[in-house]
Amino acid sequence: MDRLQQAIQKARKERDSRQQVQPPLPLTEEQRHIPQDNVDEDIWQAVPEIKIEPRLISRKRLMSLRGGADATPYDMLRTKMLQQTLTNDWHRVALTSPYSGCGKSTSAANLAFSLGRQEDLRTIVIDFDMRRRGLAEILKQTGEYSMADVIQGHVPFQEHALRHGNNVIFGLNFSSTPNPAEILQSRRTIEFLEGLETEYKPDIILFDTPPLMASDDSHGFLRNVDCALLLAAAEETSIDHIDVAERQLAELTNVMGIVLNKCRYISGAFGNEYGSY
């Protein structure tokens, strides 16, 4: 019995000694001014900066671009999304809808701008709805290639992408792709995403993905994301369509939630107001 107690005490001492953290060495004056992720910063800054015309804010409903009271709904969505991603260690988030016209691309753009105001987060937004220009049309950007060209190796991502501020990168489609389902389900797409995460180390990757009931484009790809938001249009998308789409989505990935878009409400509908609310 004495031997057992001695062994236990010895093990405790060894464990305690391993848990003692040595104090870090003080940084030199030169080290204090060297960014710890200098290589990543250079890679992000090498991406060309996007230019968005101010008139598009109201015309394309880019309410999160400048922040403020008008951005509150998207800021709330951003915060709720980040709470779930941090809790579950999720990084790849898809936005989809039952059919087109639910406003998922507009929501993806606004959510990206809202995330961009979180200076300690890095976000990459990829438009995988390859049958149309989508985000490129909303942001009024022009170019020669699409994300299909990037995946197939016709153009490097860093030459095709556009950067907003210091911490948001967009991968857009400047032309439509005739066979997106085959591309999204290919091994090349998986390798592209793995390379993107290794090189750019984003905290969040947002995917604007095709509607679930319009084609099979999303069905082969959504297994590669951690979770998805389902967007529905108020007074347009039926409960039956939402139910079917949610069940389809749950078979492919984790359903983070359902966002009811295009809602109409009057000021003060949510109770007491104060400040800019």
Image: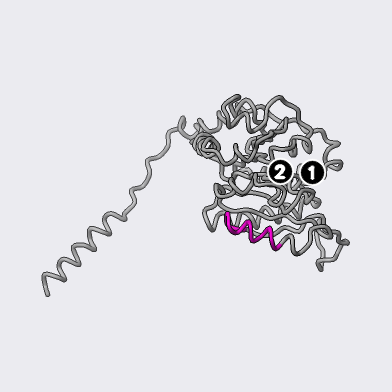
Residue 56 x/y as whole percent: 83, 38
Q: Which residues are magenta?
A: 243-255
Q: Which mark is residue 62?
A: 1
Q: Quadrant of the C terminus?
A: bottom right
Q: Nearer the viewer, residue 189 or 269?
A: 189
Q: Horizontal and vertical percent for residue 177?
A: 69, 33
Circles 1 and 2, Cβ within 8 Å, touching? The answer is yes
Disc 1 residue type?
Leu
Residue 10 spot, x, y in % from top left: 18, 63
Query: Along the horizontal axis of the image, is 137 left or right of 30?
Result: right
Q: Nearer the viewer, residue 145 or 120?
A: 145
Element type where label 1 sits in the image = loop
Residue drawn 82% across and 55% down?
262
Query: What kind of element bears circle 2?
Result: helix
Q: Is residue 251 magenta?
A: yes
Kindly give the residue lying farthest to the right in the view shown: 266
- Asked if one can make out residue 263 in the rendered structure from this viewpoint, the answer is yes
Residue highlighted by disc 2: 113
Please tell me which residue lies in front, 80 or 132: 132
